[in-house]
Amino acid sequence: MLRIILLLALLVPSTLNALSFDGKFVQGHFIIGKTQPQTEIWIDKKKVKVTKDGYFAFGIGRDRKYDIIITTKKDGKKQKIVKKIKKREYKIQRIDGLPEKKVTPPKEVYERIKNENKIISDARSVNSNLTFFKNKFKPPLEKAIITGVYGSQRILNGKPKWPHYGIDFAAKEGTEIKAMLDGTATMVEDDLFYTGGTLIFDHGHGVSTLYMHMQKIYVKKGQKVKQGEVIGTVGSTGRSTGAHLDVRLNWFGTRLDPMTVLKIK
């Protein structure tokens, strides 16, 4: 009998710290984890929030090559899980016809770009207790053609530039844009140098979405929106060659592939 009790005691920690994941351990992917309530979670060395019912969120960067370490702690007992990250192949996208000042900005706008990047970074760093990230996302446009994909290496006017970190939907100017998920507007800007009319929504636990190149914005900073609510219209503002919507998904400063949550075929 004593031997059986000892054996059961040894098995308890693995049961207490049981984990499950919705998402793939692939570059650019968004993942929702599930653990038992009152469990502490670290992704690599970053401690993340866990909802009362045991959910947490994290993401894998575009170029991450090394393993990800997930640490759990419950009732003083720690457990580590190491996950291999699968690499992806990315496309090359060539865009010509852009104004030269948008490809290589003149020095006089460097300070403006720096300030705008700070505003965006601050909005993406919000770590609220909202739990909307657990819900299913819906596409922001009812009918649109995908013209740009996540991760593609961009060649602008023949010059290699940063990869594209979003999904581009081509649509007529003025087309209504709908919120992909419930959230709170943490940034509302109508004229950023690169992205023009831009919105950022917080969905909780460091998860945020961005809408770029908008013509009109119907939301104010701090406003709460419901999934499917019209938040603005498609435009061609900022660095753009035509009417389209660029949407992005972030986990704090990590840029993720929106298609991992939109699941558009």
Image (spheres, grey):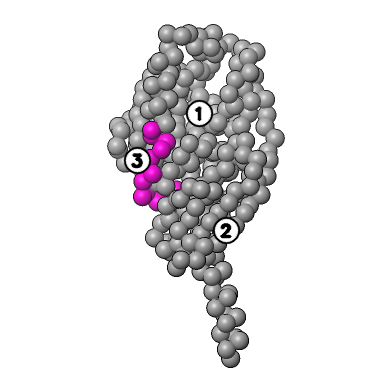
Q: Residues within 10 Å of mark 2 (few under 14, many from 20)?
A: some
Give the SS element for disc 2. strand
Query: Residue drawn 47% across and 53% down?
Result: 56
Mark number displayed over residue 208? none
- Specify which label sits upstream in the sequence, 3 or 2: 2
Mark number displayed over residue 246? 1
Please say whether residue 10 is visible from this viewpoint. yes
Give the SS element for disc 1. strand
Q: Position of residue 216 (x, y in %)?
A: 37, 24
On the picture, is 181 further left or further right than 3? Answer: left
Query: Residue drawn 54% across and 44% down?
Result: 59
208 and 149: which is toward the camera: 208
The reply to whether callout 3 and callout 2 are in contact (CB within 8 Å) is: no
Residue marked by disc 2: 80
232 and 122: which is toward the camera: 122
Give the SS element for disc 3. strand
On the picture, is 56 further left or further right than 26? Answer: left
Q: Residues within 10 Å of mark 1 (few under 14, many from 20)?
A: many
Q: Position of residue 229 (x, y in %)?
A: 37, 39
The amino acid on which the numbered mark 2 sits, given as a three-letter code, is Lys
Quarter containing the C terminus:
top right
Q: Quadrant of residue 79 in the image?
A: bottom right
13 and 165: which is toward the camera: 13
Identify the magenta region. 122-135
